[in-house]
Amino acid sequence: MAAPLICPSILASDFARLGEEVRALETAGADWIHVDVMDGHFVPNLTMGPDIVKAIRPHTSLPFDVHLMVAPVDPWLEAYRDAGADILTVHPESGPHLHRTLGRIRQLGARAGVVFNPGTPLNILEEVVDLVDVVLLMSVNPGFGGQSFIESALRKIERTRAILDAAGSKAHLQVDGGVTSANAGACVAAGADALVAGSFVFKGGPSAYAANIQALKSA
């Protein structure tokens, strides 16, 4: 079983040192930088705009995996792509035409992803699987870091993997929410190949990032 991609969420980082934080994550062995964008409307929190993404872009060569918890999402796609996003993931609930939104992301030259909240049905994936480069399954309800992993997400990972395999899709299957070394192995065994982790990666400060990332990869 291959080690998963580790995508630290900078929502859990020291916001006063974001440039230093993303450099430290690259040195520590992270694969992608996960950027949680929240608008205080679609989810009950407010985080970072495209100017922040643009400001930290020069500090790492790692792909920026930008999770847009924004509604309506379509007006923001170009701004985050221009700011340096390599991957843009959107929720089916964040706009009226998911197929069009995913197509637009690809037109902008980014990889397109679709996000499923714990209560969002997976049948939507079957209708857009040919436009998807990343499927992100939320194992918490979005809006805040530091939440506990919802165990039923493991069954949803298995079902998602079956849909992707049946379609012959090469899309990454990513899991986000309460991911630690205690459940990372179960996520990968269920079919995930990319893990978002915030609190777990950042605990202990920069000197601990490499060990924390390796603990997830080897779990």
Image (spheres, rainbow, N blue to C red):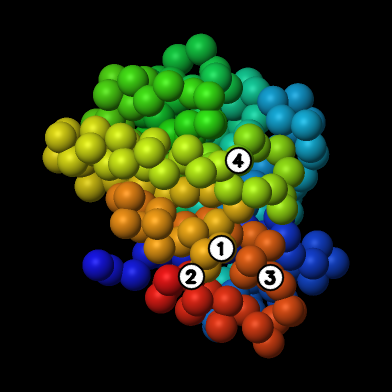
x then y, percent, for residue 131? 30, 32
Q: What residue is shown with label 2?
A: 216
Can residue 133 be seen from the camera position used here? Answer: no
Where is 153 relative to 62, above or below?
above
Residue 142 locus on image (x, y percent): 65, 37
Work out how far the residue at label 1 is from the one at label 4, CA to CA, in angstroms.
Answer: 13 Å
Crowding at dot 4, Cα within 10 Å, few <14 / some 14-19 / many 20+, comes out as: many
Q: Which residue is mark 4?
A: 140
Residue at image position (64%, 66%) is 200
Residue 3 in sight from this viewpoint: yes
- The amino acid type found where label 4 is placed reads Val
Residue neighbourhood size for the residue with mark 3, other residues' Cα within 10 Å, grouped as few (<14), some (14–19), many (≥20)? many
Residue 202's disc number: 3
The number of callouts visible is 4
Looking at marks 1 and 3 on the same chain, the residue that comes earlier in the sequence is marked by 1
Name the residue tied to disc 1: 180
Q: Are marks 1 and 2 in contact (CB under 8 Å)?
A: yes
Q: Earlier in the sequence, mark 4 or mark 3?
A: 4
| Chain-order first, disc 1 or disc 2 | 1
Vertical comparison of 107 with 18: above or below:
above
